[in-house]
Image: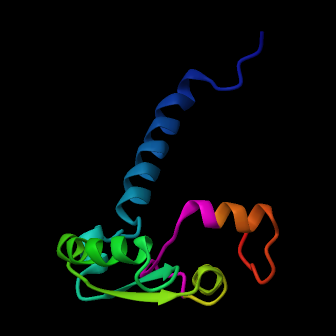
């Protein structure tokens, strides 16, 4: 059986790998913690149901706790059942500052039944 790597090459390979890992890891981009990311930002909770619905009430009850936990301002906005999901899917910035609050039953049934006006997948 033929060897691909000689014993003399092993230290050189180990040194190269060590340097590569040390230099590569030290230059990795810094990822912000959730607290750093959200601090001072405004988070939009898009409620995809009518005002006064149980989903709306849940989002409004949850908003102050979310704001305290992440250190951001949380704004609750009501949109219609399909309008909210369509907005988040097609128009909202994909920056982590928009969260949709919706009933999973409505989402699944609209998608399965191919409800008119649904743009999300």
Residue 113 relative to residue 58: left or right: right
Q: Residue furthest left?
A: 68
Q: Residue at x 40, y 78 (%)?
A: 56
- Residue pictured at 29% horizontal, 69% vertical: 34
Query: Depth check: 11 or 82 in front?
Result: 82
Residue at figure coordinates x 43%, y 41% from the top left? 15
Q: Position of residue 116 (x, y in %)?
A: 81, 80
Furthest-top residue in view?
1
- Depth check: give the residue in front, 113 or 4: 113
Q: Position of residue 23 (x, y in %)?
A: 40, 58
Q: Is residue 27 magenta?
A: no
In percent of width and height, residue 42 lies at 32, 89
Name above or below for residue 70 compared with residue 11: below
Is residue 94 rendered magenta in the image? yes
Q: Quadrant of the N terminus?
A: top right
Quarter-wise, where is residue 43 in the image? bottom left
Highlighted range, magenta: 93-106
Name the residue rendered at 35%, 61% in the picture: 26
Identify the image quadrant of residue 113: bottom right
Residue 35 placement (x, y as % from top left): 23, 72
């Amino acid at each position: 059986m033929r060897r691909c790597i000689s014993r003399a090459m092993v230290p050189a390979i180990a040194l190269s790998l060590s340097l590569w890992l040390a230099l590569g890891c030290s230059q990795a981009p810094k990822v912000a913690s959730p607290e750093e990311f959200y601090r001072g930002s405004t988070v939009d909770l898009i409620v995809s149901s009518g005002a006064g619905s149980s989903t709306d009430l849940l989002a409004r009850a949850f908003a102050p706790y979310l704001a305290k936990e992440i250190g951001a301002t949380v704004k609750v906005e009501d949109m219609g059942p399909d309008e909210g999901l369509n907005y988040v899917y097609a128009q909202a910035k994909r920056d982590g500052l928009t969260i949709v609050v919706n009933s999973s039953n409505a989402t699944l049934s609209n998608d399965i039944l191919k409800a008119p006006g649904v743009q999300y997948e």
